[in-house]
Amino acid sequence: LPEKSFFAFWFSLGDFRENFLKSRFSHFSG
């Protein structure tokens, strides 16, 4: 996959990506 396309997709997730990561880390910390 072209890096530009990958990063474009990755950043397009926006808040969903951050909320997903936070929910994952909350399981480890909680």
Image (spheres, grey):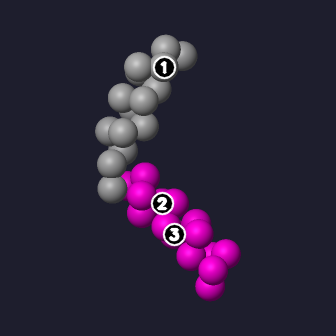
Disc 3 from disc 1: Cα separation: 26 Å
Picture layout, residue 22 above or below residue 28: above
- Give SS at disc 3: helix
Q: Which mark is residue 20?
A: 2
Specify start and end residues of the magenta stretch as a single range: 16-30
Say what amino acid the circle numbered 2 marks. Phe
Q: Is residue 21 in the magenta section?
A: yes
- Dot 1: few (<14), some (14–19), or many (≥20) neighbours within 10 Å? few
Inter-mark Cα distance, 2 to 1: 22 Å
Disc 3: which residue: 23
**Residue 3: mark:** 1
Residue 28 locus on image (x, y percent): 67, 75
> Who comes first in sequence, dot 3 or dot 1?
1
Please tell me whether the stretch drawn in magenta is mainly helix, strand or loop.
helix
Residue 26 disc label = none
Which of the two labelled residues, at mark 2 and mark 1, occupies the earlier sequence position?
1
* Secondary element at image label 2: helix
Q: Is residue 14 left or right of residue 23?
A: left
**Can you say which quadrant of the picture contains the C terminus?**
bottom right
Q: Mark 3 or mark 1, which is nearer to you?
A: 1
Q: Quick check: marks 3 and 2 in contact, CB under 8 Å?
A: yes
How far apart in space, not on screen, are marks 3 and 2 (Cα)? 5 Å
- Give the x, y percent position of residue 27: 63, 76
What is the three-letter code of the residue carrying label 1?
A: Glu
Where 14 falls versus 20 (above or below)? above
Estimate how packed mark 3 is, as few (under 14), some (14 to 19) or many (20 or more) residues with alpha carbons within 10 Å.
few
Q: Residue furthest top?
A: 2
Q: Quadrant of the N terminus?
A: top right
